[in-house]
Amino acid sequence: MNKQELLKDYKNQEDKLLLAKVLDRLEFSKGKNKIENTDFLNLYEQDLVDKFLKKIKFTNYYFFGGTGEAERKILIIYPEKLTEEMARKNHTKMISVIKIKLPIELNDEFDHRRYLGAIMKLGIEREKIGDISVKSRGAEIIVKNEVQEFLVQNLGSLTRFSQAEITVENIENMQEIEAQKMEITEIVASLRLDNIVASLARTSRNKAVEILEQERVFLNFKNETKASKQVKVGDIITIRGKGRFEFKEISGNTRKGRFVIKIDKYI
């Protein structure tokens, strides 16, 4: 495998570094005849890696984040002697769930940012942490197994969690996260992606085009840079730094012919 040849078309150094690490995992899996996995990848990274592996015609892989709705996922590469079904029996060796249960007086006190901030305060890299599902009395945090023990031992040392009950759950027992959504109404000139992004990000169309060119927009979990792409009812739009949205319906038109649309914003 000529790594330099495979990566020659990638100019972004961070992209190239990530793909080089993926190739290393691929070689380890083949050489040692065993399952390999990466750290957690965001949507952009998953899309980049997925396109790259398809480009080099490699098929023995899949992404896994604990639940079907998970946004952050690890890449799992398995050797030819295994099927994907066989590889999926090894999830417990890779990731697990840390469950934080708060005392009743702290109900609804902490949001996603507070939980993530606590983990970062302990010096854990973001790549070791998957999705964080916030509950009224705590949270379920998907993590790589290599940081699990450290987090369980040290989260309780933080003031905000000093009275919390912190336990480890098997990833196979992780229930599907029921996404929380808030309906919002937007008025857009057209259903072009740049118009939708401008409205959702509260910015100008020119700035929305920049956001698209920066590869920060995902349509149905795939990176999309085409400003003129038409958005359809049911599409999921993710804007890095702004959140995830579902195009729910077209509810009407204004007198000037603009579209009145209903959007579910994930919260």
Image (tube, rainbow, N blue to C red):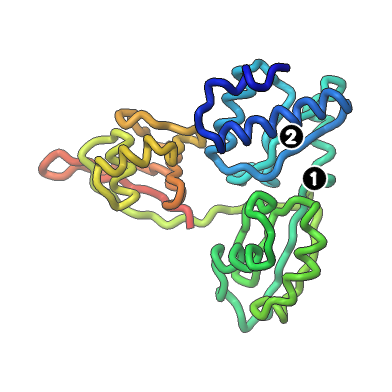
> Quarter-wise, where is residue 229 in the image?
top left
Question: Of residues 219 and 187, which is closer to you in this image?
Answer: 219
Q: What's the residue at 70%, 46% (across, down)?
A: 66
Q: Which residue is mark 1?
A: 94
Q: Could you tell me residue 257's position as x and y percent?
A: 15, 38
Instruction: Single out the residue that lies furthest toward the bottom.
Output: 105
Crowd around label 1: few <14 · some 14–19 · many ≥20 (10 Å)? some
Q: What's the residue at 60%, 23% (across, down)?
A: 7
Q: Is residue 131 above or below residue 213?
A: below
What label does residue 76 carry, if any?
2
> Quarter-wise, where is residue 114 in the image?
bottom right
Crowd around label 2: few <14 · some 14–19 · many ≥20 (10 Å)? many
Instruction: Identify which amino acid the numbered label 2 is placed on.
Output: Ile
Question: Of residues 176 and 35, which is closer to you in this image?
Answer: 35
Mark 2 residue element: strand
The quarter of the picture where the N terminus appears is top right
Q: CA distance from mark 1 to mark 2?
A: 9 Å
Q: Is residue 260 above or below residue 88?
A: below
Is there a contact, CB below 8 Å, between mark 1 and mark 2? Answer: yes
Q: What's the residue at 69%, 51% (across, down)?
A: 128
Q: Could you tell me residue 165's position as x and y percent?
A: 76, 74
Q: Earlier in the sequence, mark 1 or mark 2?
A: 2
Q: Could you tell me residue 72's position as x and y percent?
A: 61, 46
Q: Could you tell me residue 49's position as x and y percent?
A: 61, 30
Q: What's the residue at 51%, 36% (across, down)?
A: 221
Q: Is residue 101 above or below residue 40?
A: below
Question: Of residues 82 and 174, which is closer to you in this image?
Answer: 82
The reply, left or right, for residue 218 in relation to residue 68 is: left
